[in-house]
């Protein structure tokens, strides 16, 4: 009797275990995974899906990150090259943009970017990946964090952007493996949290075209431009640090702040720093007291009262939005 009872209990236990395994398997098969929305991001189908709105686009077989071909974006003298693809997008999804960049001489370029803009009926929200490779003739991969578009988003605009430092540039820039991944609810896992930059102090946000009297002097002018710093590491003494714009611009501004703590934001108006930032695009650089570069941001032409900021605070990915 005891043996039969034991056999019956073992059978029931086995049945329960097998029965419970079925719904678990079904649930896992229904989990969402990212879907790539871009057409021909590896450029194996020529220029299909892409449109050069400034400069030119050529398909290259010189080297490739993925497959046999890549895209060469060429900027006209004194201007920028921009190659675009427009995609339908939803405000309820999240998106991650990534791509690989190769350059025969990265120092020839003021900015190399992979950009995404979320478009609504009356607003454009932009995010930038500053995609300048660390060394020449080397493919480097770049990615944004998962991005949540604003309410009312109807489309996304992906741009491959090239801005040389001057005219008559003979070096080459190639793009390849461009992906725009969509993640529908549920939201992405915490592993998608953007990686913070490693510096203890970052240039977190910059406004170059003021439309508001930010310094409250009764006049809206260049003195209302501002730069925001973010303390990301431990307590740091900012005395002796210097803030500067692009080469040949304003004189560096020497900071006089004492101890600052993680999470502190320091907003400095142009009326304080005397930095004059160019509306058509500029650079802001932060130097430690020993003269080493702590951080820098390349700033494109911005709309009035639109800032370029790390999104979210301290992240590598950049966005522009009205303040």
Image: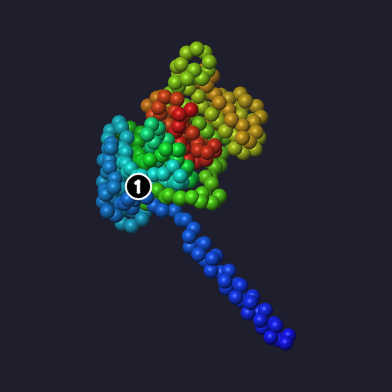
Q: Residue at x 28, y 37 (%)?
A: 53
Q: Residue at x 71, y 86 (%)?
A: 3
* Whether residue 292 can be seen here: no
How many numbered discs? Answer: 1
Q: Tell whether 77 sits left or right of 137.
A: left
Write down the residue under mark 1.
175
Q: Tell whether 85 sits left or right of 299.
A: left
Q: Residue furthest top?
A: 218
Question: Which image quarter holds the N terminus?
Answer: bottom right
Q: Quadrant of residue 322?
A: top left
Q: How is the image coloured?
A: rainbow
Q: Quadrant of residue 279?
A: top left
Q: Quadrant of residue 83?
A: top left
Q: Position of residue 218 (x, y in %)?
A: 50, 12
Q: Is residue 252 above or below residue 197?
A: above
Q: Residue at x 46, y 50 (%)?
A: 184
Q: Is residue 170 above or below residue 6?
A: above
């Amino acid at each position: 009797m005891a043996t039969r009872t034991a056999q019956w209990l073992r059978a029931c236990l086995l049945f329960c275990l097998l029965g419970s395994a079925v719904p678990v398997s079904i649930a896992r098969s229904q989990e969402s995974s990212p879907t790539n929305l871009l057409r021909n991001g590896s450029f194996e189908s020529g220029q299909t899906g892409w449109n050069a709105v400034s400069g030119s686009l050529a398909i290259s077989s010189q080297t490739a990150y993925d497959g046999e071909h890549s895209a060469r974006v060429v900027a006209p003298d004194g201007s920028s090259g921009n190659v675009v693809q427009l995609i339908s997008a939803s405000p309820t999804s999240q998106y991650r943009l990534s791509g690989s960049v190769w350059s025969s001489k990265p120092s020839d370029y003021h900015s190399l970017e992979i950009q995404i803009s979320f478009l609504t009926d009356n607003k454009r929200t932009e995010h930038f990946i500053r995609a300048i490779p660390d060394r020449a003739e080397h493919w480097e991969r770049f990615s944004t964090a998962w991005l949540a578009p604003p309410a009312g988003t109807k489309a996304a605009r992906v741009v491959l952007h090239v801005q040389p430092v001057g005219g008559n540039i003979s070096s080459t820039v190639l793009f390849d493996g461009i992906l725009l991944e969509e993640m529908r609810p549920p939201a992405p896992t915490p592993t998608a949290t953007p990686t913070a930059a490693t510096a203890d102090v970052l240039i977190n946000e910059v406004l170059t075209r003021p439309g508001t009297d930010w310094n409250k002097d009764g006049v809206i002018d260049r003195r209302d431009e501002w730069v925001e710093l973010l303390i990301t590491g431990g307590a740091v003494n900012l005395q002796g640090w210097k803030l500067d714009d692009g080469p040949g611009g304003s004189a560096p501004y020497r900071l006089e702040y004492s101890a600052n703590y993680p999470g502190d934001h320091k907003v400095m108006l142009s009326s304080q720093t005397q930095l004059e930032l160019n509306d058509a695009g500029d650079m802001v650089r932060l130097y430690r007291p020993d003269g080493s570069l702590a951080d820098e941001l390349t700033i494109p032409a911005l709309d009035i009262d639109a800032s370029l900021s790390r999104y979210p605070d301290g992240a590598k990915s950049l966005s522009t939005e009205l303040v």
